[in-house]
Image: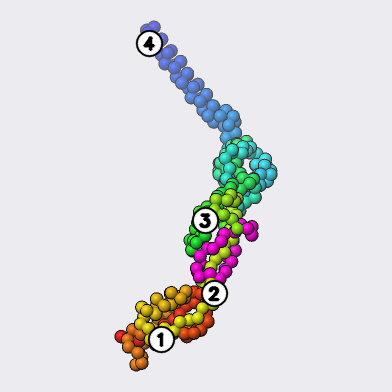
Amino acid sequence: MSSFGYSLKKVLVNLLIILGLSALLGYLFLKLYLPMYTNHGENVSVPDLSGYTFDEVQTKLSEAGLQYEVSPDSGYSTDLKPLAVLKHIPGPNALVKNGRKIYLTLNARNAPLLKMPNLVNTPLKNVQEILANMGLERGDIIYVPDIGINVVLEQKYRGQSIPEGAEIPKGARIDLVVGDGLGNQILSVPNMVGLDETEAEFVILGSGLRVGEKRYTSNDTLPAGRVFLQSPQGGSQVKTGEIIDLWIVKE
């Protein structure tokens, strides 16, 4: 065999040996050293910490072999205690390495302050949405005699009338003084018998009363379109806002 062929064979053998050793070392590094270094397979499931107080969370994380860090940002929920956990990262049931740091967002110790909106003269059906959008709670509804039915007349916080723009804590209960639609003024019901339908409506509304149900039926005593019966009857004593029903001669 020539010296050139012998040298080439020797180089190939050495190259194969080097490749084999490299493959072996790579296998040992990936399968033995790296798992040992990173504690491969020693995962911890993050417990659900939402709603727990800060003291309780410290105990739970310590038992799970995890660390924590409190986020500088906080939120506020009226349903949770001060410093209770609102959320955490990684979230519940996430698999992490032993000793991993869990980032906590806590409920603020004090409720943030809001400016009181103006609810006066607002229909009650709209008030609930306004309060909810601002993070406030509707409290008691106190009905008082007033011609405005289900219209807010006064807004109160802790028993005191509160003006628009006053600062109140988020989650505060706002009590509402609301009109019952009747009022407290006593009126004498006008007599609408004999009047046509349009004129009777004007008389009712002009007297501080409300038009109720209108029934159309046959009657031989009056022309069509005229009121032949009403309830309450003319001369009755009623409160402001009372409903007056009419019976009208049909065409």
Q: Residue at x 38, y 86 (%)?
A: 194
Which secondary structure lies at badge 1?
loop
Quote the CA–CA distance across marks 2 and 4: 125 Å
User: Which label was assigned to residue 5?
Assistant: 4
Quote the CA–CA distance across marks 1 and 2: 24 Å
- Residue 149: x percent and y percent? 50, 69
Which secondary structure lies at badge 2?
loop
1 or 2: tag closer to the N-terminus? 2
2 or 3: tag closer to the N-terminus? 3
Quote the CA–CA distance across marks 4 and 1: 132 Å
Q: Which residues are magenta?
A: 140-160
Q: Is residue 141 magenta?
A: yes
CA neighbours of label 1 inside 10 A, class few (<14), some (14 to 19), many (20+): some
User: Looking at this rendering, what residue extends furthest in the bottom direction?
Assistant: 220
Vertical placement of 110 versus 240: above or below? above
In front: mark 3 or mark 4? 3
Q: Residue at x 43, y 12 (%)?
A: 10
Q: Residue at x 46, y 15 (%)?
A: 14
Q: Which residue is under mark 1? A: 193
In front: mark 4 or mark 1? 1
Q: Which residue is under mark 3? A: 118
Look at the numbered discs 2 and 3 and tell me whether their residues touch, using CB distance below 8 Å. no
The amino acid at mark 4 is Gly
- Residue 168: x percent and y percent? 59, 51
User: Which label was assigned to residue 185?
Assistant: 2
